[in-house]
Image: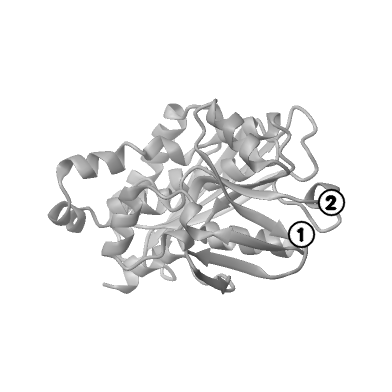
Amino acid sequence: MTETAIVYGEQGDIGRYALAHCVNALAARGIETFAARAAFQIPADRENTCLYDLKKKWKKMAGDLPFFLETEETEGGRCPAVSLPCALVTAEGRTASKSPEGAGGSGPECPEAAGELDLLVAGSAGLEGMLRIGEEKGEILSRRFAPSFLRLIRASQEQIFALDTAAAARRAQIPVIRHVGQGGVFKALWDLSARTGRGLDVDLKKIPVRQETIEVCELFHINPYQLTSAGCFLLAAADGEEVAERLGRQQIRTQVIGRMRNDRDKIIRNGEEARFLDRPGPDEIWKIWQQE
């Protein structure tokens, strides 16, 4: 199995974020060992030191991860087609045992996607996006927020790799396990509905979002539910409260956010207001460059 992710940005760890998208998505499908290769591109007007720094941080990162990662020699160069540095990461791996058919995305023909299923989110929506905004716009954040607040943001770095969450969900035999990733929770909900042919009914206020994420998003007029979310998983299970309690005993923050429907309506509730989920648009992370 393979997964590929592309991440753009000025922060030096763009390869790390791209890798997080790949390995979390693979872990949701039962992968337990990983190998990855990275290619970096920089704008044509950048110095070679920019490319060197990206490759150096990638190499150092591979040795500091909380799991073993086999890496290949990195590639890269200047590219006149890009205006921001870019990391293209492809990860692959094998599972030691057969995972549930529904893990990582059930199709409408999957029996695991049938019946009364609750929807849950494990992790925090938009956390990865908050971290990347903090790195891209650190000067702006430092003028707005106290140092203690910025330390809370930086302390969340390791949460973008959530292999333990995926493994715990598989052990609990949760039939539907999907990494949220780019596009945020709303895109993951839309994709799940499309794959299963079923609708959904979600309470917006129950989707877990850290207060730091909310404040950073408000500053840049960003919707945290449409913000890239490496390390966050969308789950579907027959008894959501029991699943949330079971994962909670393993220190995995999990919240029931709604349920799947037997029709195709995709309903988002916010207090007394209810609306249909819109078709996913571009990830909200792009707004931080559009506002410049």
- Tag 1 secondary structure: helix
Q: Residue at x 82, y 59 (%)?
A: 108
Say few, some or many: other residues with alpha carbon within 10 Å of mark 1 (under 14 / 14 to 19 / 20 or more).
Answer: many
Q: Please tell me which of labels 2 and 1 falls first in the chain.
A: 2
Say few, some or many: other residues with alpha carbon within 10 Å of mark 2 (under 14 / 14 to 19 / 20 or more).
Answer: some
Say the numbered circle drawn on residue 196: 1
Residue 226 image point, x, y percent: 48, 63
Residue 265 image point, x, y percent: 69, 70
Nearest the eye: 146 or 55: 146
Q: Quadrant of residue 227?
A: bottom left
Total labels drawn: 2
Image quarter of the N terminus: top right
Q: Residue at x 64, y 36 (%)?
A: 243
Say the numbered circle drawn on residue 283: none
Q: Residue at x 49, y 52 (%)?
A: 206
Say the numbered circle drawn on residue 110: 2
Q: Quadrant of residue 172?
A: top right
Q: Are marks 2 and 1 in contact (CB under 8 Å)?
A: yes
The answer to whether residue 104 is left or right of residue 74 is right
Residue 102 image point, x, y percent: 77, 46
Q: Amino acid at mark 1?
A: Thr
CA gap between label 2 and label 1 equals: 8 Å
The answer to whether residue 58 is left or right of residue 268 is left
The answer to whether residue 214 is left or right of residue 118 is left
Residue 91 image point, x, y percent: 60, 43
- Tag 2 secondary structure: loop
Image quarter of the C terminus: bottom left
Q: Amino acid at mark 2?
A: Cys
